[in-house]
Image (tube, rainbow, N blue to C red):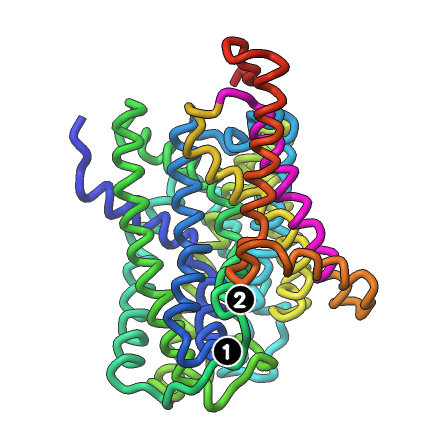
Amino acid sequence: MKVKTSDIIICGFALFAIFFGAGNLIFPPYLGVVSGDNWLQAATAFILSDPFFPILGVLVTMALGGRADDLGQRVHPNFAKGLSAIAILLIGPLFSVPRTGATTHEIFIQSFFPGSPQWITSLVFFGITAYIAINPSTVMDAIGKYLTPILLLILAVVSITAIINPPGPLVPSQIDHVFAVGFKEGYQTMDALGAPLMAGIVITDLARRGYTDKKTQQKAGLWAGLLAFVLLALIYGTLTYAGARMSTYFGPGDDRTVIIIEMIDALLGPAGRLAIGVCVALACLTTAVGLTSIFASYFYGLLNKRISYRNLVLLAVLVEFIISLVGVNQIITLAVPILSAIYPITMTLILFSIFDKKITYDATYTGAVIGAGSIGFLQALASFGAMIAVPTIQHFGEITLHLPFASLGLEWIVPSILLAAIFGGVSYYKHGHHSPITTTK
């Protein structure tokens, strides 16, 4: 079956829109501010963290089978289910989706109605989210056909203006280890955590469009993923550059939402505030709808249909509504330790799964996960120690600063490869080359 260009565009735009949410909008300008004249290095690192790993995760999961828990299956089926459940909770009701409602309020509503309470914005925002998500057959088309083109048009105007008429000069970087900061700033988007879940959505939509053959699905998914990657990379790069042009006026201690509001105001004036407000509302709504729908679909199957899809959507938006009331900065702060722990594990699984057919023993995956997870745990302790101002706990994370590639934010790479080799080697000598121990999927 021939892959239609129109289907690739719709699916690619939809994948872009689901990945491009509140975090994707507010983090690149902040990264540009703190990196200054090193903005290109920071943007490259951010793009490696997101969208490269998330899109790669979607494609790898599609190749493995397309189910959300396929990514960690060779460690152990229960591990895969647990990892998927944790990921969907983080990118769904607990952090990512509540942040969409809070960001919409702080950037859009509060700019025009300073006295407006957060709860009104969140009530309307999540009410719309629930209405669209309860109709899952329309989710992809609604995102791909209608909301995304408007979002892209607004962002194109912002990006072009930043290049043609920058608001300020480039100044020296305000941070050390620019690449590492940029790479880990991408953690906050949480897109890599959602990659295995997005794969199921993409496969379902492609099948609905008539692409039932696995090989054709993978081909269409690859083209849609490439389109989404290019769109995301272009936007991240230009937003980081625009933020770098604001380095004279802001620093690492400034709020991300304030930076983007002032950046747009400097670029486009008062009309820009309206434009970015619409942009934020669309970006946040598309993400909220997509992730809420994914959450409900996943747990509907995980719980053996004991709770209806509709009730799971309503439960999710209730939790999202409540958490959104604490505000963007608090949500970001609370997320740091958890993301520090789980992100290295997810990225390790994505990388190793590229070579899935070449990896004989499941123990190789187990070793890789233990290596990456140990480093992530230490970094989570450091972040938690800094959050609660306890130096003793914070010092645990300093161990990882001496590991190879720590300056790039990739301190988990060597431990994961080393333990993967050790575990794989032990299995080789224990079971023999002709007796692979693999998990039945």
Residue 267 falls left or right of residue 371: left
- The boundaries of the magenta stretch are 360-383
Majority secondary structure of magenta residues:
helix
In this rendering, is residue 136 above or below 98?
A: above
Question: Residue drawn 41% across and 40% down?
Answer: 58
Mark 1 = which residue?
34
Question: Residue drawn 49% across and 48% down?
Answer: 192
Q: Is 374 within the magenta? A: yes
Residue 228: percent from left, percent from top:
32, 51
Mark 1 vs 2: CB contact within 8 A: yes
Classify mark 2: helix, strand or loop. helix
Q: Tag on residue 51?
A: none
Mark 2 = which residue?
181
Q: Viewer-proximal residue, 310 or 386?
A: 386
In the rendered structure, which disc, 1 or 2, sits on the residue that comes first in sequence? Answer: 1
Question: Residue drawn 76% across and 63% down?
Answer: 394
